[in-house]
Amino acid sequence: MDSKISILDRLIIEGEKFSFDNFCYKDSAYPGEFAGTDKAEWLEWKTRVKNIVCSFMPDQSSAVRLAVVASGVVTKGYGPDNFHRAKSTFLTSLKNTKSVLIEDVYGELKLEESENVSPLLSNKIFVVHGHDSDFKNDVERFIHEIGLEPIVLHRQADEGNTIIEKFEKNSDVGYAFILLSPDEIAYTVSQSELPEKSREIEYRARPNVIFEFGYFVGKLGRSKVCCLHKGNVSIPSDLSGIVYKKVEASIDSQAYAIIKDLKAAGYKIKV
């Protein structure tokens, strides 16, 4: 429940930052008077709000109805009033959803969560990551939003265990996301005497990420491991048969493909 509320809080904070001056490209004929095409940030926020509200709440709830109404407000070619109406209605939808989650007075709360249809596997999703905290947080956010439980090792209790013991204890998951980010620079020993500019360097993920990558491929099988890579990181060549997905600014660009993979792995995603 707390994770859902934190998602709503983030969306509310993000939404408050939009204004008539920054949500769209200006109309070339009447700059400052009428709105142009939506910017990607506003379009992404609107889409996420509607999807989240619809996944948390039943179809006939006031929050879902507000989100649907807000989505139908046309802003392009209109003045500030339409934008403010859309923004205000989206925010009201989010706040209504948050209120229902905190205290379900009218029995509106949608209790369904995503589930794994296989009784042998867990709804926990392990997140293997390097030094890119934004990448890790973005993936955690996405996993929460589709109703599953992200497991990030440093957030779990130590209980006096060594790192490897802690890792093994928390690896009882049904799926794993491996995040490859360019955290280290490497080159062969033969190039160590060359001038720095002459070396053929590679940007690599941390060794522990590669170790855990192989661990989960062995434990879960290739179909239950999703490798996401960002930047110009080197891709391991000896893990054949793995599907790699390139992430740009946000994991949302790969959301459809990831959800499709999760469904193929046996998950019933409530989105």
Image (cartoon, rainbow, N blue to C red):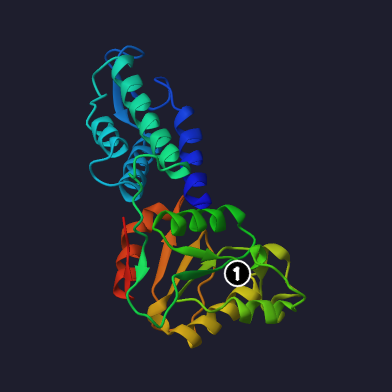
User: In what quadrant of the picture does the C terminus appear?
Assistant: bottom left
Residue 105 on image: x %, y %: 39, 40
- Kind of residue at disc 1: Arg
Q: Is residue 22 above or below residue 236?
A: above
User: Dot 1: within a 10 Å radius of its alpha carbon, few (fewer than 14), some, or many (20 or more) residues?
Assistant: many
Residue placed furthest toward the bottom: 218
Q: Name the element at disc 1.
A: strand
The quarter of the displayed image where residue 242 is located: bottom left
Q: Is residue 129 above or below residue 174?
A: above
The quarter of the displayed image where residue 78 is located: top left
Tell me if I can see residue 27 in this picture. Answer: no
Q: Is residue 116 above or below residue 6?
A: below
In the rendered structure, the answer to whether residue 116 lies left or right of residue 134 reads: left
Residue 196 on image: x %, y %: 72, 64
The quarter of the displayed image where residue 121 is located: bottom left
Residue toward you, 57 or 72: 57
Residue toward you, 59 or 221: 59
Residue toward you, 191 or 258: 258
The residue positioned 39% from the left and 20% from the top of the image is 20
Tell me if I can see residue 46 in this picture. Answer: yes
Marks counted in the figure total: 1
Residue 45 on image: x %, y %: 39, 39
In the rendered structure, the answer to whether residue 171 lies left or right of residue 217 reads: right
The residue positioned 70% from the left and 76% from the top of the image is 191
Residue 193 on image: x %, y %: 76, 75
In the rendered structure, the answer to whether residue 54 lies left or right of residue 1 reads: left
Residue toward you, 166 or 78: 166
The residue positioned 29% from the left and 66% from the top of the image is 260
Q: Which residue is mark 1?
A: 204
